[in-house]
Image (cartoon, rainbow, N blue to C red):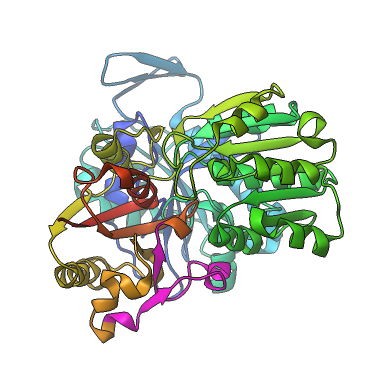
Amino acid sequence: MKMVPNSPYSTTSRAEEKVYDKLKRVNIVDPKGEYYVYHSLNLPNHKTKIMGEIDFLICGPKGIFAIEVKGGGVQCKDGEWHFTNRHGNVARKREGPFEQARTAMFALKKDIGREFGSHIANSFSYGYGVIFPDCRWAVESSEWEAEQIADLTSMRNFDRWINDLIAYWRNKPYNDTRPLEKDLMAVQSYLRPAFESAVPLFVQAEDIQSRIVQLTEDQMRLVDIVSSNDKVLCTGGAGTGKTFVAMELARRWSAGGENVLVVCKSTFLKCYLDSHFNMENVFVTTIDSLKTTVRRSGIEQFDSVIVDEGQDLFQLDYLDAIEERTQGGLSNGKWCWFYDLNNQAGLFGTPDLEALDFLKSFQPATIPLSTNCRNTKVILDKVKATLGADMGVNGAGSGPEVEEIVVKTAEESAETLQKVLIEVINRGGLHLEDVVILSSQDFENSSVSKLPSKWLSRIRNLDEFSMRDFPSEGIGFSNIRDFKGLESDAVIVIDLPPPSEQETVHPFHYVAMSRARSLLYLIYRSN
């Protein structure tokens, strides 16, 4: 079964981590379609709760099944449930886990019906189960049946329990239906469109205006604050969701009838945002093509302005150009400026701190983003240990260790790169488009150019045009500078010296390393 996300969300529940590891090893082969498992699926339209949640949801050709997980010890006294965690703390609830799973299942069915129609919602079989991974369960009751329950013993033969649970519910009267394959795929995409690929918080262009954007608490707080502040400076390290929040703000402001200008420095980032977040009344431009964007839009001044990767635009000339296109100017206009001055400055010239002081003179609200929602904790720890750079807390769950290899020559670098590609693609099963190679050099001068032809034919040298459908077929290659603001499941960094040998390239190390969501390989060239 395909896990969404591909590593568990950060959680204090060791029980959920156990179940996640078990579920990802379950293999259900069905010619009618794939099985997806969604961890911690939110239910905004729950009948009895402001916000419900399903610990794990299985969705496949044989139906939709909600799983509730309860770790530690479990008791029920006089209709009240008692849950004891590993620290000995007891939580008391009137609603039991079976009722939790049942109401969540019906809430989801109702939501699917609203989105796709009752005929599609009713084409699925539905069921629910409860897992007690830390204790044995031998209690019989009219409120549940043995097939609905997995305990410590069941965890030893988890595949069998999952299949028995599905069979139990499909044997119920009128519950043995199967959806059409196209309807199954549509529902699976709907359940969590923002996390279909390995953690990312980006959504597809066609979904951005219709889906509820899932943000961290820090991000949601920022969105709410901006709605009540006309001027905002937002700081945050790589991976804290600055770009995603910027585009969510653009969506909200444009939905209110505003003409929104989004400005950045990188042409790659501009092309990516312009195509993937194509929204009415939102105009994305680089600072260097601002005049052209204004001419083509027919708008002399915009109602609101958003600046992404703003550390690249801390120049007084740039501020003058943006002020000219902002209704009310920077002093009385509506704007939000996202930046990371500590770690990502210097790739497009040295920032002028007078420009930042100028922005601060307008007394904007200053909001930090501190929750990393892109990188695994392993990658966060590696960046901090290697560069001393803080990229926020939490991270997108656990992940593989970062691999570091030091070579002497470009030929040795290419040989090592080929081995890594074989490891992640041929053996690891990653798609070509899941991998990006980043270098401090352009393609012709990089170690990539020395790869055998069978690999060169599978590599796509990214440019402005290709970024419009990124990620697309082929392994991506980019100069580190051009890939700022973007990300990939797996990143292989080449042609940089080890950080200990040349501190002046630390911004390149930081940008390159922070692009990786789950897999990071560092092939250093030592002098």
Decide if residue 187 is in sight here: no
Q: Where residue 348 appears, x then y in whole percent?
A: 49, 50
State which quadrant residue 227 falls in. top right
| Quarter of the image that includes the C terminus | bottom left
Q: Nearer the viewer, residue 257 or 339?
A: 339
Q: Residue at x 29, y 73 (%)?
A: 448
Q: Residue at x 24, y 50 (%)?
A: 400
Compared to residue 437, the image places residue 324 above or below, namely above
Give the magenta range: 455-480
Q: Residue at x 50, y 20 (%)?
A: 94
Q: How many numbered discs?
A: 0
Q: Nearer the viewer, residue 40 or 359?
A: 359
| Quarter of the image that includes the N terminus | bottom left
Compared to residue 89, the image places residue 298 above or below, namely below
Q: Is residue 471 magenta?
A: yes
Q: Where residue 511 appears, x then y in whole percent?
A: 39, 48
Q: Is residue 425 magenta?
A: no
Decide if residue 13 is in sight here: yes
Q: Taking 474 as reference, is 114 left or right?
A: right
Q: Where residue 158 appears, x then y in whole percent?
A: 26, 50
Q: Nearer the viewer, residue 311 or 13?
A: 311
Q: Residue at x 68, y 27 (%)?
A: 225
Q: Where residue 255 appears, x then y in whole percent?
A: 80, 47
